[in-house]
């Protein structure tokens, strides 16, 4: 494995860019390749086998063609469905997404935590194990964010439709007195300004992306795979669908 090889990241669409930006911030010397599976987005209501099949095709590209040294599954739904398969099938490190239920449960004062995620993430074994291990002492309010991924993909994060949908999903959580809101989908950080209009500052919004970036750094340094060759980092973006969706959210 070559330390100058890129880090690969993928998501069903643009959501994983919320993880990509944290990885690039923490590891500015690393080359990256990002793959948005926009032609198959959203993943949220697909069967696990379909997502595993898509993940394998994406590995053909990220590992087979781009020779990535580490893969970030920058999608909670794909992590839930496919990360065990990916780790067993390919000989390189994988970092997945895990809803930040643990810190939320640890720091909650009201004892009520809200989780916004896709149906696929809520159904996953990983999520239930996390709940059992870390959140037995708090009340968890689960809310599937149906329709939110599509709004982010369409660049409609600041519109009335997004605001109304978020209001419908989050207002009942506020009535139940949540003090932490866990974002369990990598698309949702792009909705934080709209979410804040509803929650105000009294609710802590948790996005696991910075912790994921730390994990990437830890694994690369452990395997002596940090890029220390100098020179400017190269960032490449690919999509199975319309690349314009991705371009809209790039810095
Ligand atoms: N960004 C994906 C996630 O984190 C979105 C899933 C979807 O495409 O529905 O779950």
Image: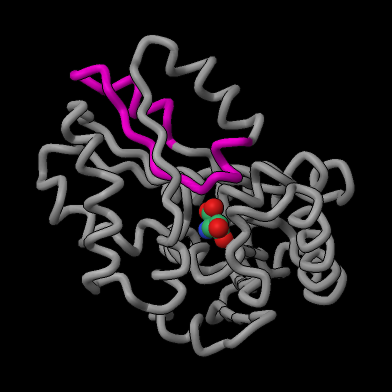
Answer above or below: position of 184 versus 12. Answer: above
Query: In the image, what residue occupies the spot 18% across and 38% down?
Result: 203
Q: Is residue 63 left or right of residue 127?
A: right
Up-down: is 130 above or below 72?
Answer: above
Quadrant of the drawing holding the C terminus: bottom left
Q: Nearer the viewer, residue 224 or 53?
A: 53
| Residue pictured at 43% horizontal, 35% vertical | 100
Q: Which residue is depicted at the point 50% across and 71% down?
A: 14
Q: Position of residue 42 (x, y in %)?
A: 58, 64
Task: Give the residues in magenta.
Answer: 100-123
Q: Does 116 lie within the magenta span?
A: yes
* Quarter of image, res 125: top right
**Residue 20 visible, this angle:** no
The answer to if 120 sits in the magenta stretch is yes
In depth, the one of 98 and 147 nearer the eye is 147
Q: Position of residue 37 (x, y in %)?
A: 66, 71
> By what rule are the colours in the image chosen?
one colour
Residue 87 sits above or below residue 229 on the image: above
State which quarter of the image contains the N terminus.
bottom right
Q: Say whether residue 233 is left or right of residue 149.
A: right
Question: Which residue: 40% across, 69% down?
Answer: 152
- Image coordinates for residue 22, horizontal then vertical, percent: 43, 59
Counting labels gives 0
The answer to whether one can see residue 180 in this image is yes
Pick out the residue farthest to the top: 137
Quadrant containing ligand 1 reads bottom right
**Viewer-closest of 245 and 66:** 245
Rendering quarter of residue 173:
top left
Q: Is residue 88 left or right of residue 26?
A: right
x, y percentage for residue 236?
61, 81
């Amino acid at each position: 494995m070559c330390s100058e090889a890129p880090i690969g990241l993928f998501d069903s669409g643009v959501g994983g860019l919320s993880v990509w930006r944290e990885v690039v911030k923490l590891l500015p010397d690393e080359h990256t390749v990002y793959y948005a599976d926009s032609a198959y987005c959203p993943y949220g209501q697909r069967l696990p086998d379909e997502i595993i099949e898509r993940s394998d095709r994406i590995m053909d590209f990220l590992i087979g063609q781009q020779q990535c040294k580490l893969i970030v599954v920058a999608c909670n739904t794909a992590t839930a469905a496919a990360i065990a398969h990916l780790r067993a099938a390919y000989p390189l490190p994988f970092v997945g997404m895990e809803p930040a239920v643990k810190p939320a449960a640890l720091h909650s004062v009201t004892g009520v935590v809200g989780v916004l995620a896709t149906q696929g993430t809520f159904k996953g074994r990983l999520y239930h194990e996390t709940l059992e291990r870390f959140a037995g002492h708090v009340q968890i309010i689960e809310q599937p964010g149906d329709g939110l991924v599509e709004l982010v993909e369409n660049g409609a994060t600041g519109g009335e439709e997004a605001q109304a949908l978020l209001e419908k999903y989050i207002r009942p959580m506020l009535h139940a007195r949540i003090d932490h809101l866990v974002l369990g989908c990598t698309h949702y950080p792009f909705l934080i300004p709209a979410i804040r209009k509803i929650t105000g500052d009294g609710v802590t919004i948790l996005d696991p992306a910075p912790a994921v970036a730390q994990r990437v750094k830890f694994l690369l340094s452990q395997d002596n795979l940090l890029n220390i060759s100098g020179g400017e980092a190269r960032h490449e973006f690919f999509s199975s669908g319309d690349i314009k969706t991705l371009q809209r959210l790039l810095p």
